[in-house]
Amino acid sequence: MELDTLPSNGNAPADAVRVADNWNSRYTSARMWPMIRRAKWIEGIAPEAPVSEVAGRALRVRLEPVAHYLPLAAKRSDKDVEYVHQVRVASRRAVAAIKLFQPLLPARRSRRLRRKLNRIRRACGDARDFDVLIERLSSSPVEDDVGREALVGRIKQCRDAAQVPIRKVRKRLPERRLARRIKQLVARVRWRADTSVCPEPCFGAYARVELRRQLDRFFGFATGDLTQDEPLHRFRIEAKRFRYHLELLAGAFSTPFREQLYPAIEELQERLGQVMDCATASDRYRSWAEQWAGTAEAAFLSAWAASEEAELRTSRAAFLDWWNTERAEALRASFAELLTSAGANGCG
């Protein structure tokens, strides 16, 4: 049986266990690591496929990179800071997949795995923030190179300390244990409703219901007071979450979904990121300036914080000018049109 073959019914037959066992033995092999790809889409699925079949494939594609990048982030982040970034992104995407297909998963087992994924993401949070700040400082032109180098040195010390939680979470969740938990979850994917009352739907029908639900949630955040930092930050997090769900649902919809609607959300997230990166940097610099009062770095930090705050005002104003009521309404109308078209075509 091929690695990509999954059972298409809801009975978790012996084939499902054999698939999971076969996948796990290859999955934990070092020979498989070079084959890991940061897949955005879940390829090889069709709208008419049983939702359990798609769920099994999606979970595997999303969980696999977590187990790949976690040991790299723990052991080799000094060689490539992207390892930390990738394990955070992989964790978010994996959680999105578990949430999307939760009705097909055992509640306790999926809840435990979600907690572990969130623990991994949080463990990498400070390290990633420091990596971004170091890159931001190192690449920006300043007059006081000596002051900048001293500050970068301080931040690198903080970054070294932030590596400890990553090592700890990896030690608590070694590759084979994580692989086993993923295998067990994939093997238990099935349609859990009473099929005599509620038959298993095709992926297309399931995706339409989920997309409507996700749209309501997303636009609920989009209408907050985005002139304030906290609502804007929540909107950024929601845009990420929404984007990751769209990646999972894309196979159920026509070409415009990937080529028009998804890029619109991607651009929105990028613009929000530019604004919130300024807010994060300015907050960090102000906090450090207070902690390191009286040092040479403190004066540099205060000046840098003021610069970031000025950039924050400019970038926020530009974002609010771009993300206006007309743009939001047009985007929602485009999603509604897509859903109407998809509904007219049944599972297609």
Image (tube, rainbow, N blue to C red):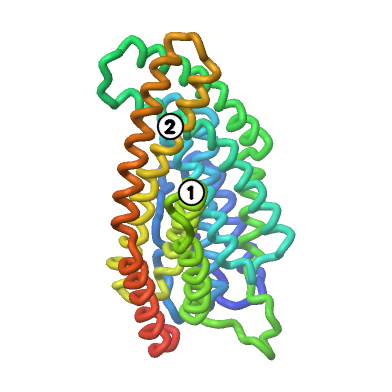
- Where's residue 334, x and y in %? 33, 75
Q: Is residue 60 above or below residue 88?
A: below
Q: Secondary structure at mark 1?
A: helix
Identity of the amino acid at label 1? His
Q: Determine the residue positioned at 39% across, 56% down.
A: 40
Q: Determine the residue positioned at 54% across, 31% down.
A: 74
- In terms of image quadrants, where is residue 13? bottom right
Q: Is residue 7 above or below residue 35?
A: below
Q: Secondary structure at mark 2?
A: helix
Mark number for residue 282? Answer: 2
Position of 32 with respect to 146 (left or right) is right
Q: Is residue 295 visible?
A: yes
Identity of the amino acid at label 2? Ser
- Where's residue 254, x and y in %? 33, 76
Position of 83 with respect to 74 (left or right) is left
Q: Nearer the viewer, residue 11 or 251?
A: 251
Q: Is residue 50 above or below residue 62?
A: below
Rate crowding at label 1 as few (under 14), some (14 to 19) or many (20 or more) other CA atoms within 10 Å.
some
- In terms of image quadrants, where is residue 197? bottom right
- Mark 2 and mark 1: Cα distance apart in space: 14 Å
- In terms of image quadrants, where is residue 335? bottom left
Position of 24 with respect to 264 (left or right) is right
Q: Name the image quarter holding the C terminus.
A: bottom left
Mark number for residue 233? Answer: 1
Q: Determine the residue positioned at 29% across, 26% down.
A: 139
- Where's residue 227, x and y in %? 43, 51
